[in-house]
Image: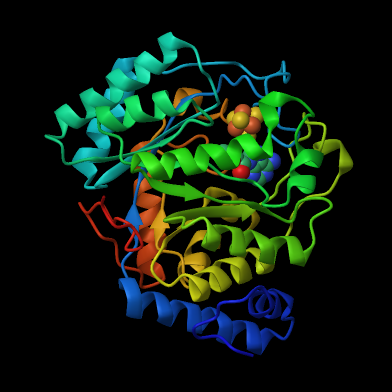
Amino acid sequence: MKLRDIETKDEVLAILSETDPQAIEKIHKEAYDVKVENIGSKVYLRGLIELSNICIKNCLYCGIRKDNDHVHRYELSDKQVLEAAQFAWEAGYGSLVLQAGERISSEYVGKVTRLVREIKEISEGKLGISLSLGEQSRDVYREWFDAGAHRYLLRIESSNPELYSKIHPANNLHSWERRVQALKDLKEIGYQTGTGVMIGLPYQTLEDLADDLMFIKSMGIHMVGMGPYLTHSETPMGSLGITTTDLSLTLKMVAALRLLLPKINIAATTAMQVVDPEGREKAVLAGANIIMPNMTITEVRESYQIYENKPGIKDDAAISKTKLEMNLEKNGIEIGWGEWGDSRAFVRK
Ligand code: 5AD
Ligand code: SF4
């Protein structure tokens, strides 16, 4: 099997189809080596702030979808966000992510703009800011970019429009084409642009997953966050009773992506940690190089459950940090403290 310099869907598919444990170990090792050779061995951290769980969308898999009445909705105050940003700054995270459900009101847009500016101010411009706030108009993306955000994460969820339509309600708010356009807008504006998919979705085939990686390549994406699909019982898809119980396919996806795109940033995501307590560390050893420790205040963590069994919901930012450091150290993984850890696939315009 070809592992170096892979370029084609068939080569990706061969990796994803591998079932022999020894061959899989070799794939992970090769992906790790390719990472170290191209972008070094360090892991970069982005402190995650879950700004709000209010969302106008109804993705059929997500626990905080609009129609889930069991969720207590919250929005952090400016003060709470700035305190978290201060924590990130002092902890040496180098960079943070503001994540929330999707909202488009002008008041909300203005709040994000203000927060981005203030975070830049308190860190003397040094804290990198990524946003993960869903689909917005090109003007809004530009406003937030001009305020100082420089990375944006917007998962395509699946590169197969048909599969996309099975996991989202049929209406204009949930359009695959619109989402692809948003990714193009983000790139054009000058963001380091991130996307990703869920792995193990109902109806999803290995071929879909190979196509996902080819989509990421063809779009010229700079960073990727992927994770296993997990059930949430209060969702329409949750009632299908299909969930992901092992990490092997996710790790093969990470490794295949690293072999396909040696220089991009790849996140080891929280969903991996749900399936396996050391899932994120395993992903790092299979080619990932970014981890996003949760910094959200404990009081609201419980309300941001896009899937069930989210780890660390009783922890605070300091505990999340200590636990992560211990796990990384145990696995011999070095942290790039105080660095932005920009994607080496990104060329500033
Ligand atoms: N399982 C796994 N990932 C999920 N997401 C949302 N719901 C689930 C779920 N049930 C992911 C989506 C979304 C990101 C914020 O969380 O990929 O883009
Ligand atoms: Fe909203 Fe994102 Fe959940 Fe979809 S996945 S319902 S956009 S929070």
In the displayed structure, would residue 9 be above or below residue 192?
below
Q: Residue at x 29, y 55 (%)?
A: 342
Colour pattern of the rendering: rainbow
Q: Quadrant of ligand 1?
A: top right
33 on left or right of 247: left
Farthest left residue? 124
Report the residue that reaches farthest toward the right: 240
List x then y, in percent, for residue 139.
Answer: 40, 24
Pick whichever, 288 or 2, lies toward us.
2
Is residue 305 visible to the viewer in this orientation of the structure? Answer: no
Asked if residue 60 lies left or right of residue 274, the reply is right
In the figure, residue 210 lies in which quadrant? bottom right
Q: Position of residue 323 (x, y in %)?
A: 40, 52
Q: Residue at x 35, y 29 (%)?
A: 142
Residue 194 in the image: state x and y as whole percent.
46, 49
Q: Quadrant of the N terminus?
A: bottom right
Q: From the viewer's perspective, is residue 287 above or below residue 164? A: below
Above or below — where is 165 with respect to 332?
Answer: above
The residue located at (67%, 69%) in the rendering is 248
* Residue drawn at (36%, 15%) of the image: 111
Q: Is residue 69 visible?
A: yes
Q: Is residue 261 above or below residue 54?
A: below
Q: How many marks?
A: 0
Q: Nearer the viewer, residue 82 or 309?
A: 82
Of the pair 53 and 182, the residue shown nearer to us: 182
x then y, percent, for residue 278: 53, 62
Residue placed furthest toward the top: 107
